[in-house]
Amino acid sequence: MTTVEFGGGPTLEACQQFANLKDGSEIPKYTGHIHQLRFRQGHTYGEETHILSKEFPHLIKRSKSDAIVKYDQPDPYVTRDFPDGLIPGYTGYVPQRKYQHGNRYRIETDACVTGTQAAYARGRQQIQELQLSHSFYFDKAHQ
């Protein structure tokens, strides 16, 4: 079992053992649908899900042997180009769009994405310059 601070966390088996859950019980903080759970009371969450799994075995669709796959998370501060262009009809969050007015959505969105990418590039350049100047002064001080 690895610690959460190192990017890991307890395994499914470790959680079940720690919570003393029976086979068929759901893990606490599970956010999926559990059939009939809101109409039940008088037992703990683990006991109630265990009872429901016995009463409705045909509703259990997940496999216990499925391993949880962890993917390497990319750097969240890197802006990537859209490989297939923008999604048609998408009207969700676009950085800096609230400051754009009076144009078509596509034109405003392109301007916002271009501006955001330029701002990130300027930020990366400033970080590199700062690191370079820091290393220059650090080297001079320790000669």
Image (spheres, rainbow, N blue to C red):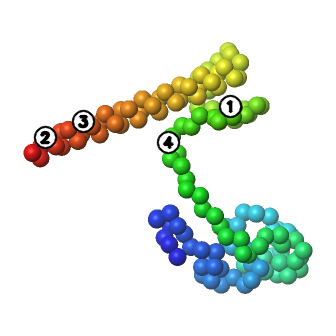
Task: Kindly report which numbered mark, 4 or 1, lies closer to the viewer in this rendering.
Answer: 1
Q: Amino acid at mark 2?
A: Lys
State which tag comes first along the sequence, 4 or 1: 4
Residue lying at 59% horizontally and 22% vertically, measured from the top left: 111
Q: Are marks 2 and 3 in contact (CB under 8 Å)?
A: no
Disc 1 marks which amino acid? Gly
Structural distance between the alpha carbons of marks 3 and 1: 38 Å
Dot 1 alpha-carbon crowd within 10 angstroms: few under 14, some 14 to 19, many 20 or more: few
Name which quarter of the figure residue 28 lies in: bottom right
- Seen from the viewer's position, the closer of residues 58 and 21 is 58
Q: Position of residue 63 (x, y in %)?
A: 77, 73
Residue matched to label 3? 133
Identity of the amino acid at label 3?
A: Ser
Pointers 3 and 4 in contact (C-beta within 8 Å): no
State the residue lying farthest toward the left.
143
The numbered mark, 2 or 3, whose residue comes first in the sequence reads 3
Q: Earlier in the sequence, mark 3 or mark 4?
A: 4
For disc 2, the marked residue is 140
Residue drawn at 64 percent across, 25 percent down = 109
Residue 64 in the image: state x and y as whole percent.
73, 75
Quick check: 76 left or right of 56?
left
Residue on which disc 4 sits: 77
Between discs 4 and 2, the one toward the N terminus: 4
For residue 53, above or below residue 104: below
- Vertical position of residue 42 compared to residue 99: above or below: below
Count all numbered tags in the image, as a single digit: 4
Residue 123 lies in what quarter of the image? top left
Task: Report the disc number at residue 85.
Answer: 1
Q: Residue at x 16, y 43 (%)?
A: 139
